[in-house]
Structures are given as C-alpha cells and as structure tokens.
Amino acid sequence: MRYDCSTLTPPTNRRRRLVFVAAAVIAAACHRGAAHRDIFLISVDTLRPDHLGMYGYGRPTSPHLDERFRHGIVFERAYTTEASTSPSVATILTGLLPQQHRVRLFYQLLGSDVPTIADLLPEDYQTAAFVSNMVLTDEAIGLASRFDYYDDYVARKEPLREKWERSARDTTNAVLAWLATSSDNARPLFLWVHYMDPHGPYSPPDHWKRSFTHEGTRPIDPEQVPVYHRLPGVSDAMVYMDAYDEEIAYADSEIGRLLDGIDKRRGLQDALVLFTADHGESMVEHERAFMHGYHVYDEIARVPLALLAPDAKPQRRSELVSLLDIAPTILRFAGVTPPASMNGADLLASSIPSGRTVFTEATAQFAASLQRRSAVRGYGKWVAEINAKTRKVEKSYYYDLRTDPLELVRRPWPREGTAGRELLRLIQEDPDRGGVPEQYAKGIELKAPKVAPGVSPQVLERLRALGYVR
C-alpha cells in the first residue's frame, strides 16, 4: 500500500491500502527526488555491538560486516527504543516511539493508521521483506499488507527444542531466490531482511563449525539463565558466550553472502545499505544472564548501527543516535520529506544534534509488574521504574556512563539537566503508562505472558519455546 500524492487521499484502486491516513501525513510524503535508488535494510535479532569486530571485539565474529562497513559510517552510540523485538522493529519501520506506534505486546498488530517506510516511499519502488522471527509474521504484527512481497516462513523447529524460526542460511536463500525470479530490476527496490540468529537458544547449525574456545571460567548460577536455553549441568558463563559468538559468526557469513548476491544482481554502489539490530543481550553484567526485555541496561539497549551510501565518506561517529532515525534517513534518501510525526535525525546529515535525548523502554513480556524506561543525554542516563498496577514511578536513579559505563553505581537524579523532565513527561503522556496497553489490548492481566488477546494455544506454545512468554 502506498499513498497517492496527486490526490492526497489513499488510493482506491490498490489491493492493499491503509484504512485511514491523515491528509497531512500524505502531503508530507510528497516531495520526491528525481532519481530513486535501491535501499537495503538488514536487521539482526539480539545482537550486541560490542561482540562485533567493527566495534572493537577481539574475536573474529563478523569479518564480512567489518569489511563491508569499513567503507561506510559506523555509529558508536546507537540505542533501541524497546528491549524486545516487536516494538523495536515497529520503530525501525515507522520512525515512531512505541507509545506512538502502539505496538507494545507480542501478537499486537500495527494499526492501519500508522504508515511505514514501505507505505511512504515513492510509487515506483518495489518493496519486499523477509523475516525469520515468529513474532514478525503477518499474523503477529500485521505488516504483509504494507509490502509488495512479505515472506514470513518460520516453520523450522530444532531437534530436541521447540524453537521456531528460519535459519540465517534459509533466509538468505529465500531472498536470493526471490531476487533471481521475482524482483523487477527496472524499478528501485526497498528490501528489508531480518535475521533471527543469534537469538537464544545459542545453537549454530551443524554445518557451521567455527569453534570459539574460552580461557578460564566465569561461574554463573544456572537459575540466572532463561530456561528455554539453559544448558544442563553448565555453570560456566563462557560456554554460553562461545555459543553466542558462534551464532553471530554464522549470521555474519550469511549476511555477507546476501550482500554479495545483491551486489552481483543489482549493484550496491548507488544504494543505501543500513545494518542494525532490534536490541542487545545481557551476558553476566547484572541480575539476569543471557536474556533481554526486562531492563534498559546498556548491554540490552545499545545496538549496532552502520550504513553505506553513495558519496558517504568512511567514518566513525560518536553522536547519540536511535532506531528512530532509520525511517527518516531512508525516506530522505528516496527524496521523500518525512511526516512531521517522525522526529528522528538524518543519519546522512553532516551533523546530528548534540543535545538530543534518546529514550528506551522495557515494558513488554519480562517486565509484567515493573516497567523500566530510560533517557540518555550526553553521557548521563536517567532511569525510571514504574509500578504496572499503580502506574506510578516507584524508583528513579541515574548512571554516569562516562565514569560508570557498566552501570554499577545508582545515583540520585541530578537536579540540573532536562532529560529527566523529558522522560517524566513522556511517561505522563503515554496512554499505556505502566506498560499494560489497556487502550490497545484490553483484557490483558498483569502477569506473564504479556501477549495480546485471542492468541491460539499453538502460538503460545511456540512463544514459550522461544522464551517470549512464561
């Protein structure tokens, strides 16, 4: 579904269309450039930036990504907007905060009144998406109608584990097959590919044998590890880290194969290529190990973000950026003025505002009774903990990320600065304040699983197998 800027009304002769879009939003998208070029967006599930070579990691987990983005722009301080997949991916595609796009739970559909990148691109763009996480299937998030082609096949189940996904190799194969048989080389293409690896359980496929071995041990209480990927008898955290890194290396090899295939078929020299993740993953830094969704610590909130673009000089940038910035960057590259509702920065601009605040929340499945939200400004991080029943802020604390990058010392909020006030205002304005989206998913109880109503028992079992619900 696209917008028809000649009439400022949604087109009536298309099979796919939004139910309602404000005329102002349509008008905002009508400034189009003369030449439309390919756009490739690659996202990876559960990927920490500090486990990639281009962010200084010592292990060779990402040689293909490192080589590609050595020629591009790497953002060193990028944050997600949510510590779980559905809301953060919705942000990537809409350029909106979760409380604006209203996807807060798994199996909660993106509203038909919320436009995505694919909706706002000029009419001549062909749009396609390939996802490998079951919470991104059309029945789970409702994105298929936004794309010309939406491939959400995730029927793979691991031996001995009820894990449902599509492997990185199968995902790459599907994309390359579609490019060879169904894409239109005469039209510009917007292609989004989401890889599930390295989401837990950390289990690279049998054909992939790049063995990372650790020195020494790091004792861990097995009870800290989510049951869905807890290894019987293993109390050494390094065993999990080895497997996590192997999954990253496996995904990296398939992303490398994908980009090589795209380059051969369509060329990348004039294209925009963006690479990111939906969120990170805790290791053993804090109270829970090898999981996400429950907190806004940097190991969960920080994500990789890098891009390639024509005439973009290779550089590393230290400004604060967010997943909010991806959609407006893509639209501007395509010659489209983003809607006023998108207030993200242009990642291709020569400068990004230095005084901005970026927001992250953990309001989904693992935070059923206590929701956490953060605001980062400069190297200060303000955190608020909200009681889901009373909807009141119960705790507030501050981290100085310059002197305490591991977030070990909680301090009172500083009196000076505006980020704390911005965070409180955002919380007060949130129609779902407290993390229970009563306005959009009525009937949800204040206990896990945090899934929108009407989900079948079979789907719930798959979600439990992935650790998304308990």
Image (cartoon, rainbow, N blue to C red):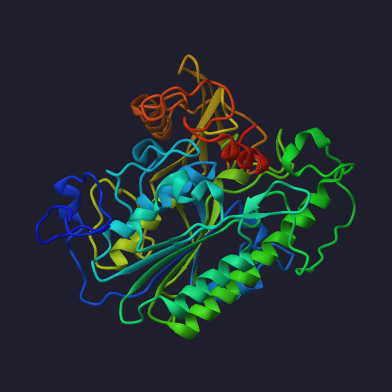
Quick one: which residue is furthest to the top in this view?
A: 390
Picture coordinates of residue 40 (x, y %)? 43, 69
In the figure, is residue 51 to the left or right of 193? Answer: right
405 w.r.t. 159: above or below: above
Tell me what residue is drawn at x 83 percent, y 39 percent. 220
Quarter-wise, where is residue 418 in the image? top left
Give 59 or 210, whichever is nearer the viewer. Answer: 210
Q: x, y (%) of residue 324? A: 40, 50
Residue positioned 34% across, 38% down in the render: 100
Q: Is residue 263 above or below residue 99?
A: below
Res 224 visible: yes
Q: Quadrant of residue 369?
A: top right
Q: Residue 175: percent from the left, percent from the top?
A: 51, 70
Residue at point 60%, 32% (across, down): 366
- In the displayed structure, 207 sits above or below 384; it is below
Picture quadrant of residue 97: top left
In the rendered view of the protein, which quadrant contains the N terminus? bottom left
Residue 204 x/y as whole percent: 73, 60
Query: Residue sitting at 55 percent across and 53 percent down?
Result: 303
